[in-house]
Amino acid sequence: MRVGVIGTGHVGLITCASFAAVGHDVVGTDADRSKIDALSTGDMPFHEPGVADSIRAGMAGGRLSFSHETADAVREADVVFVCVGTPARASGEANLVAVEQAAREVVAHASAGLVIAEKSTVPAGTADRLTRSVALQRPDIAGSVEVVSNPEFLREGHALHDAMHPERILVGADSDAAFDVMRRLYEPFTSEGARLIETDIRTAELAKHACNAFLALKISYANALARLCERAGADVEAVTEVMGADSRIGPAFLNAGLGYGGYCFPKDLVAFDHLASSLGYDFAMLREVARINDEAIDATLEKVRDALWNLEDKRVALLGLAFKPGTDDVRIAPALMLAQRLRELGATVVGYDPHAAESAVRAQPELEVAPTAYEAAREAHCVVLCTEWEEFQELDFDKLGEIMATRVFVDGRNAIDGERAVAHGFHFYPTGRRPLTPGRA
């Protein structure tokens, strides 16, 4: 089949790579011409494991190309995916201007029988608006061009794997013809056992928001438990292990720490809350999830202050700047939020990340970054682990201690063996567990 993709960000580029990898002919386009120029030469706009190789393989095999012109992505296409951003407005409402603009460009070049698939996360009712827009813009093809909802369920850092081995594929449509097109599109995945869930369009649109909000809820629940465990002298890791052993709960997203970040969870949570309000329902739980997430940053900051007392003239090293491992995405990254608060209290902050340093400096030009974890820690009074990159598991605490001003380690992700750190003279502050000090490990 022939597939067009409008928008080559994190979702759009993985959509291009995965469909080309299973044999479809894919054309990607983007409003940012410089991004298309870079992609056409094999340069990636962001770090995501495996994507660069997959994109280059698709281009070399003739299954994937990129164009500045929307017409090239739409011409003779069976399905065109809209994969543009839906940032939150000040009110919390999802900003759908880019979605409308992308759809209008697609419709301008559309032929009868085209399926336009929402891949962007949008509030329930968006497809109805797009369908009306098609009818107004192109009455000659109204009724023969269909809009469907096909939300993505990708984890940054694992996005290509998730696209190639989906847990479920969700399609919302209003006609058998549209369902048939999407079934044929996804046949390479469903034939390998991927579950296809078919619903009406509004259910599919709402389900995406519901999923992200619930995952954010699990993270915030674990972080609230961490605060309680610290006060009760309990171990949040042991508590969540017990919880996760219950098949009704499961262990995923129960890791206490600095909280969630990234582009999706924060904006989807407020957009879902706004949608609920617009429908006359006060979904207050969603606002509490966000409050607890912010509280996780405050709790980590207080550990640093407790360890160092006054922060003026103190140097704090942050290990990990991306919002999660496996990506260079620093949008609403907890590490950068912590860095800002530390600087406001007078501390000098230096960070290190194996992939996100450049992105972090673009987001916070005042942030000092180092080329290695050890250079970040040099003369630091405290190290805070903010992102659980695998390389931090192998930290040499002897070396770290020798170059630091004071041996204080705050583990914002419970990713480090605290007893190993304490054996090398560190005062160790985990999350949701009792602090460890030399002689008390």
Image (cartoon, rainbow, N blue to C red):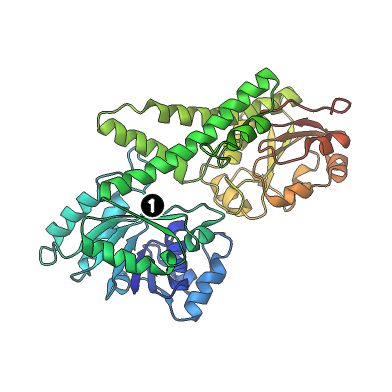
Q: Residue at x 72, y 23 (%)?
A: 306
Q: Label 1 sits on what residue type?
A: Gly
State which quadrant residue 378 falls in: top right
Front-lying residue, 91 or 175: 175
Residue 353 position (above or below residue 2): above
Q: Quadrant of the C terminus?
A: top right
Residue 105 visible? The answer is no
Residue 278: percent from left, percent from top: 26, 33
Give the residue number, with chain letter if any, for mark 1.
85
Give the left or right position of residue 83, taking residue 412 as reference. Answer: left
Q: Is residue 420 visible?
A: yes
The residue at 25%/56% (across/down) is 173
Quadrant containing the N terminus is: bottom left
For residue 354, side relative to residue 27 (left or right)? right
Observer-nearest residue: 242 or 70?
A: 242
Up the image or down, 399 lies above or below 239; here it is below
Element marked by disc 1? loop
